[in-house]
Amino acid sequence: MREPVIAGNWKMYKTIGQAVQFAEKLKAAAIPGGCRVVICPPFTALPAVSGVLRGTPIGLGAQNMHHREEGAFTGEVSPLMLKDAGCRYVILGHSERRQYFGETDRDVNLKVAAALDHQITPIVCVGELLEEREAGRTGEVVARQVLGCLNGLNAGQAERLIIAYEPVWAIGTGRTASAGDAQQVNRLIRDLLAENFGREVAQQVPILYGGSVKPGNAGELTAQPDIDGALVGGASLDPDSFIAIIRSAVSCKQ
Ligand code: PEP
């Protein structure tokens, strides 16, 4: 059985002090076994949070990464630097990166390959815009993103991925995809993985849902057979609500 993954994307929130305080609280909480918990603070807080989490099973991730190891790329952070700061995960292709910073599937594809080369687990985000859903194009859009972002990977690389289905209209809006709709898209993603990398790989890759996940809806969403956890934005900023989401997701999978 796939272990549920609950990842918190803090976006551009929290100073170093606030991030450390959160990490201390998470570390002290009785987090149930049988799940993977990851927090993704802003770059500035990564080394300090890494220090707090050292020796715990809680994973640390970044929210973006450049695909090159080093170079004249002002303002960018490389896979080597993320490893150095203690990261084992990186969120790639988040819709806010696509919307505000012009990231394309090709860019995400380069970053996914680079992360895997450096033993960093990519959390690859895909999801349709509201107008695409309303035009009945969700499946086509998500399939294009998945294939574009994973282009050129082999099965051995693909089995190390985490994918997050995040309908763009549900991110930070308080609107959530129904559990049934989210399950349908996650199933489509798993079928695509099976077609391209084999059934075994497809059964192994955690496929998360993201988009206004809260303690009140996490259980119903993660109870779906192809929803293996959640990528949580706003509700991951408060330790109590993040811990409640973790507990709810784990109890639904037992
Ligand atoms: C996200 O940032 O990935 C996200 C899903 O945000 P929110 O939970 O706030 O919708």
Image (cartoon, rainbow, N blue to C red):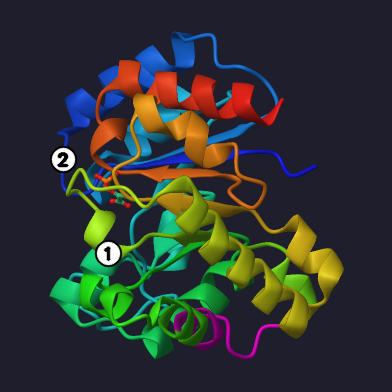
Image coordinates for residue 83, horizontal then vertical, percent: 49, 54
Q: Is residue 176 above or below residue 57?
A: below
* Cα separation between marks 2 and 1: 20 Å
Which residue is at the front of the view, 122 or 247? 247
Label 1 lies in ligand 1 vicinity (Cβ under 8 Å): no
Which residue is at the front of the view, 184 or 45? 184
Give, as a three-letter code, the residue at label 2: Tyr
Image coordinates for residue 38, horizontal then vertical, percent: 48, 38
Q: Earlier in the sequence, mark 2 or mark 1?
A: 2
Mark 2 element type: loop
Which residue does the image show at 67% across and 67% down from the upper left?
190
Q: Is residue 148 magenta?
A: yes
Image coordinates for residue 89, horizontal then vertical, percent: 50, 52
Left or right: residue 46 versus residue 179 is left
Q: Is residue 121 above or below residue 108?
A: above
Give, as a three-letter code, the residue at label 1: Val
Q: Is residue 209 magenta?
A: no
Q: Quadrant of residue 44?
A: top left
Check residue 168 in the rendering and tell me which mark sits there, or answer none.
Answer: 1
Q: Which residue is mark 2?
A: 13
Range covered by the magenta-colored residues = 145-154
